[in-house]
Image (cartoon, rainbow, N blue to C red):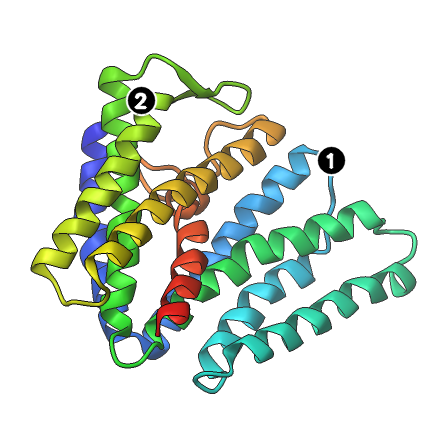
Amino acid sequence: MLWKRVLSAAIGIPVLLFLMYRGSIPLLIFIIFLAVTGLFELQRIYKRMNCQVPRLLMYGSALLFPLIAYLAPYGDEGSYLFTGTVLFLLLHLMLLVFAYPRFGTGELAASFLGSFYISVLLSYLILIRKIIPSGFEYLLLVFLLTWACDIGAYFVGSIWGRHPLCPAISPNKTLEGSAGGLLFSLGVAALFQLLGPKLFSFPMMLLLGGLTGCVVQLGDLVESALKRMGDIKDSGDLIPGHGGILDRFDSILFSAPVAYFFIKLLL
């Protein structure tokens, strides 16, 4: 499987870098595609859990929230996202009346949670890219730190992993792998500070690397928990060697919003 992972990365990473560099409409379309595909995979997991969610609302969120993130005036994105959140909640609550008794509170809660887990969190990639004047550099940094943690956890865990990290959810993840992921993320943060643009002070860069190394692994465990509840190994098979969109982008779902708020606090 390793050669498939490498081949997929060799094709996908240049495309992703191009989309990040271009930003604007191409990045928006890509994020919407990721959200729609991720929600499709999540909906299949829900179905295996005997949870029938309102698909129109879920898939609608894949268009709504990325568009809000893209169209909101710079500096006022938070209030626009909050307004979208309230309207989206009201739409869910209206289904209790107009679709009664087809959807219960459990199905509506699962739809709301899934929409935010995927559509809203992915929208932070757009928000990071919009940061003036170094949106591309910030977005590139977030992906590099995320990839470094994933790679470090995979290789260190494969070679030296002995002690389970969270066996009830993901038996193959180990404490050694977790430490490796954190160290790789810190290492890439240090290298980026030394060789790349000076986006932060050195201590703040290391802090971002450490935070990313932690939340990336939490994001991975969240997706593992969902797959465990749906009794599946991979969320999909769209990306050879990696599985589905959720399998590949579960980490960035957590690192992107954390990095965004970290950057905004320091600007």
Residue 32 visible to an observer of this rendering: no
Residue named by callout 1: 50
Left or right, residue 57 beside residue 233? right
Residue at image location 48% in from the left, 34% down from the top: 221
Residue at image location 40% in from the left, 52% down from the top: 255
Return the residue found at the far left: 195
* Secondary structure category for the residue under label 1: loop
Q: Position of residue 210 (x, y in %)?
A: 32, 45
Q: Is residue 237 shown above or below 128?
A: above
Q: Position of residue 129 (x, y in %)?
A: 33, 72
Q: Could you tell me the amino acid type at mark 1?
A: Asn
Residue at image location 57% in from the left, 27% down from the top: 228
Q: Nearer the viewer, residue 215 or 41?
A: 215
Q: Do tag 1 and tag 2 residues touch (Cβ < 8 Å)?
A: no
Q: Nearer the viewer, residue 181 or 249?
A: 181
Residue named by callout 2: 176
Return the residue found at the far top: 162
